[in-house]
Amino acid sequence: MAASPGPAGGAAAGALHGSGPFGLAFDSGLEIKTRSVEQTLLPLVSQITTLINHKDNTKKSDKTLQAIQRVGQAVNLAVGRFVKVGEAIANENWDLKEEINIACIEAKQAGETIAALTDMNSLNRPESDGQITIFTDKTGVIKAARLLLSSVTKVLLLADRVVIKQIIRSRNKVLATMERLEKVNSFQEFVQIFSQFGNEMVEFAHLTGDRQNDLKDEKKKAKMAAARAVLEKCTMMLLTASKTCLRHPNCESAHKNKEGVFDRMKVALDKVIEIVTECKPNGETDISSISIFTGIKEFKMNIETLRENLYFQSKETLSAMLDALLERTEDFTDCAYTSHEHRERILELSAQARMELQQLISVWIEAQSKKTKSIDEELELAMLKISHSLDELKKELHSTAAQLAADLVKYHADHVVLKALKLTGVEGNLEGLAEYACKLSEQKERLVETCRLLRHVSGTEPLEITCIHAEETFQVTGQQIISAAETLTLHPSSKIAKENLDVFCEAWESQISDMLTLLREINDVFEGRRGEKYGYLSLPKPMEQAKIAKLGLKLGLLTSDANCEIDKWEDQENEIVRYGRNMSSMAYSLYLFTRGEGPIKTSQDLIHQLEVFVEEGLKLASSVQAFSKQLKDDDKLMLLLEINKLVPLCHQLQAVTKIPLQNQVFLKVDKSITKTRCIMATLVQLLSLCYKLLKKLQMENNRWVSVTNKDSVDGKT
């Protein structure tokens, strides 16, 4: 396990190891500067090492002199670029400006010193007899190199503080907008605020995503991934839950459903800040107990020390460790779903481990009193026996948890209970709701307990974190599905209540799918494989997956914006609305693909979906063009300009789908998602404009009818 980088480790490590951009579309430019630091620093470190390792007795050939001078010049140039980056960061962060500038001045001085000491041209001049060079003052070069590395480190540490402040500031903006969303009372106001909220969430996702990539502590990285996953999924839930509350303001279950989403998002936001600042609120400590596998590993390490020193460990310590470890196996033996055979075998192996420890202690005491070869052999044998017993216990625990999880995922793969809840909802069947809510609660408790068992056998800290995240997700989402189903049952004709239930059911189904992937990874670790990722069948590289996921987040939010515009229309069967809704639905499937979820599994599935998406886009353009014929010239021109944006984009996306795949899968997917985002952004504008022009046309028609009726009445009079 990598050591924790500390609060400043992220950006410094990122600069050295290639972190991604920091919120490119939203940031003040720090991400470009940080990347520039990376490009400057890597060759710089190498060149400094070359200088310091330069031997005094190296033959002073022209080739050697030229090589030394080139290194010195390269270092100085690299320092110059680095200083510009540091000064730019300083100018944008006044509270750190003085500290950064001092470090930059030190770096500049060090670079100039190195350049002067490696200036071999001066050796060819007559007056150079007293010239100080690398050959006469190697110590000076070493001092300058150390000063340079010290000042560079200072700037990186200060830049890291800037990044942490950006994340905190971004979190605070998100929280402030969430508070406004909680209190909103009108649908129109909600649409406006949610649009702002979406942009803020994208910015926060960019910043935290890059921070996650920079983290070297795998446990922290897994915690950050879990918190970000909660925020991403809850963003979609927040939209439908809030809309349901606005549509049914007096429905208690709708409010309960919405509050659950807001509460979970706030906890996740706090968790992100806790990770980046390495500070727990109110001095809290991590109280989660270690897993059984971790306990076994630590116990065996303690036993190993007996080979070196018989007095390093105490008998009481080892006995207490084993007791605590075996006590945790009660999670398995007390579980109602553990088979009788597994339960008996776990109890048998636990008893055997206790017996083996007593035998070890007996031999250990004897070995302390007399040192003979036979006693050493007996001690070694006793150590091997208890290690073997614990290995057998590990196998049994893993087999128990893995079998329970596999059976559970398989049994619930068809989601019968969720389908029944949806059906009882649209039927308004309160008795059916009670029955299936009870069944879902039972299913939830079983999944939660299975996640706890998987955590014990996960084998690595990141997988432990993933198990905890799965457990929490099932616990919370199960309750929210029931409240969403209750709302729909009370309002069976409500489209938004049905949509809301669908969103929470999709989250549940997604977590079931994730649990299968988690089980595979746990099995891989147990069997000595390091667990390959199973998502993104056509995008095998983790970095590609991360980039595609970033592209998809904005696409997901654009589908929400489009749905908000569609909801404004009174006539939901209007052709423009129908095509727009189809496009939004397909774009949402593309968004799920970027997360490794949903019906699109491969790039071929993606291409087929894009082809249908383009067809719907062109149909929408035709419908809008037909609608424009009813408008006055100025309004018609305005609408045609928007159509002229949409049609070329559709044709461009169509062209991308025709490009042969070969080995450029990522580039093709990247271009496809980018073009789809452009089309969705145009669609949102087009739907908004069509709605406004339709309202304007209706008002004019009503005014004309009113005037005509008045003239008719006046004529009769």
Image: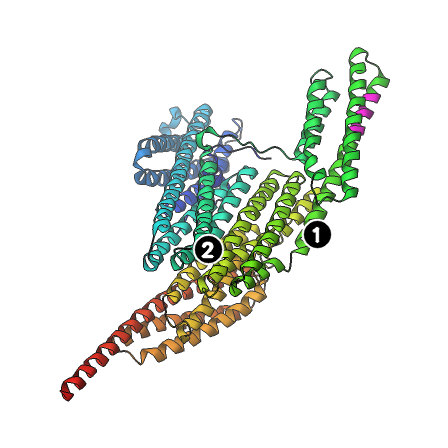
**Looking at the picture, does residue 544 appear above or below residue 103?**
below
Of pointers 1 and 2, the one earlier in the residue sequence: 2
Q: Position of residue 706 (x, y in %)?
A: 21, 79
Q: Position of residue 247 (x, y in %)?
A: 39, 60
Magenta-colored segment: predominant secondary structure: helix
In depth, the one of 596 and 127 nearer the eye is: 596
Q: Residue furthest bottom?
A: 716
Q: Which residue is mark 1?
A: 407
**Looking at the picture, does residue 394 appear above or below residue 575?**
above
Q: Quadrant of residue 359?
A: top right
Local crowd size for mark 1, using a 10 Å CA cut-off: few (<14), some (14–19), many (≥20): few
**Looking at the picture, does residue 171 appear above or below residue 578?**
above
Range covered by the magenta-colored residues: 378-386
Q: Which residue is mark 2?
A: 236
Residue at the spot 34% in from the left edge and 78% down from the top edge: 627
Residue at the spot 68% in from the left edge and 40% down from the top edge: 457
**Looking at the picture, does residue 207 appear above or below residue 315?**
below
Q: Quadrant of the C terminus?
A: bottom left
| The label number, if any, that marks residue 652 in the structure image | none
